[in-house]
Image (tube, rainbow, N blue to C red):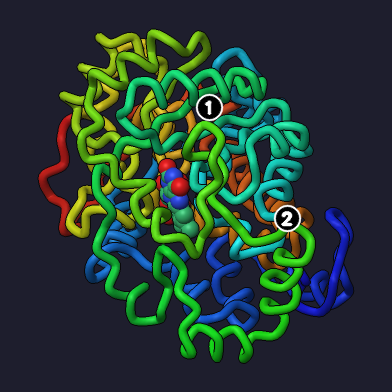
Amino acid sequence: MMSPDGHTGPGRITSRQRRLLGQALELEDFAGLVRPFLPRAVHGYVTNGADSGGVVTSNRTIFDRWRMVTRVLRDVSARTQATTLFGHEYAAPFGIAPMGSAAVIAFDADNRMARAAASANVPFILSANSITPMEEVVKANPDMWFAAYQSPDHAKIERMVERVAQAGIKVFVLTVDVPVGSNRPADARTGYTMPLSPTPRLALDSILHPRWLVGTGMRTLSRRGMPAISNVEANEPIGLFSRNVGRVTGYSSFTWREAELIRKLWKGPFVLKGVLAAEDVRIAREGGIDGIVVSNHGGRQLGCAVSPMEVLHEIKAKSGDMTVIVDSGFRRGTDLLTACALGADFVLVGRPFLYATALAGEAGLRHAMSLLAREVDIGMGLLGVRTLAELGPEYLRATTGSVHEHQPEY
Ligand SMILES: Cc1cc2nc3c(=O)[nH]c(=O)nc-3n(C[C@H](O)[C@H](O)[C@H](O)COP(=O)(O)O)c2cc1C
């Protein structure tokens, strides 16, 4: 994309971007810093939640439920946050969540996020709803994961599994919390629709944000052609302005039967993303699934969904040896440490990483990731742990007087 003050190559940033990054001291800063540069509809598409947006808020306030007990006089000089998932040792306990249409927000965002993740040695998950073909992105990051939105048609499942394997992708994620598209009145209000519809309002919104218009919109059109969702069907891109694009996520007849078929066909690690019920975790475990992402899709699906942190302990109890990943609202190193103490193996972060990419490309994302890794590192030192595996429920206390008084026993 064109950065806030001009075109830059993948890794380089302008002095203005450098100044803006200097103002980004924590993950929550990125949304505000990038807001002036993005059309309202585009910024809103990333920020908004479903229905009234209340779950986006509760995904943050939930963390007030816990405080942590520090241990002292331990040698923490050799602490490490390195975490091994599916046989790969990552440098940090977090990765980049799959985000559809990311390249509409920031020029070439799929490749840029993939490269930044590779250089930081953290996982990058490409969404099926992305603009850049997986075969191209995997060249930027051979360790990337792929998150499918999958048609229940068995022949299409076979073709997609074959395509992902052919691309050399290591981890197959299936997003399971979008049987139907969600209700997002806030998007409708700003004019962000799928398919995109070039209304006068959207045109005006874009003209009023010339840096996005030239640096992302026009640059994408001139360099990459008309944007299309490229990773949903086995090999048929669906134009963002095409009427068919509206139905690519809502596969309401997709069931455990189809998940079992993918399990049978896919030889590598297979992860279900968007699980909140312990009973579903049991079914997944018995079906030979390797991992789950406990997620409410960042508050973008059911407008009254529980936050993953509310159910993490129940889920952990049913997960057996499956890898437990969690996302939705994670912004602080201490949020990650709290989740690890509740039994999570890993965390995904969505919006702040996309905003950081929109603000300053790969450098912006690397900066965001380093802020989070630094907070994890400080938290570990202050808690007195050398590895994340040392964390457990004994480090947690429920806050008194919180609205969540019915805290379960850990
Ligand atoms: C703009 C945007 C697009 C998203 N697209 C997808 C997607 O295509 N597939 C998917 O599984 N999750 C998608 N998500 C959800 C994220 O993967 C993740 O669950 C969520 O953003 C985590 O919450 P956070 O943004 O509060 O960190 C999207 C989220 C955002 C913000």
Residue 315, placed above or below residue 44:
above
Kind of residue at disc 1: Leu
Looking at the image, which is closer to me, 268 or 309?
268
Residue at 70% over, 40% down: 117
Is residue 394 visible from the viewing direction of this image? no
Is 62 positioned to the left or the right of 198 in the image? left
Residue linked to disc 1: 388
Is residue 268 visible from the viewing direction of this image? yes
Residue 367, disc: 2
Residue 129, placed above or below residue 234:
below
Count residues near mark 1 (Cα–Cα under 10 Å), then give few for <14, some for 14-19, many for 20+.
many
Specify the quadrant of the image occupied by residue 393.
top left
Looking at the image, which is closer to me, 121 or 210?
210
In percent of width and height, residue 16 lies at: 83, 77
Is 338 positioned to the left or the right of 311 in the image? right
Specify the quadrant of the image occupied by residue 27.
bottom right
Cα separation, mark 1 vs mark 2, equals: 22 Å
In percent of width and height, residue 383 lies at: 51, 37
Kind of residue at disc 2: His
Looking at the image, which is closer to me, 90 or 79?
90
Residue 348, disc: none
**Residue at the extreme left of the image, as rendered:** 406
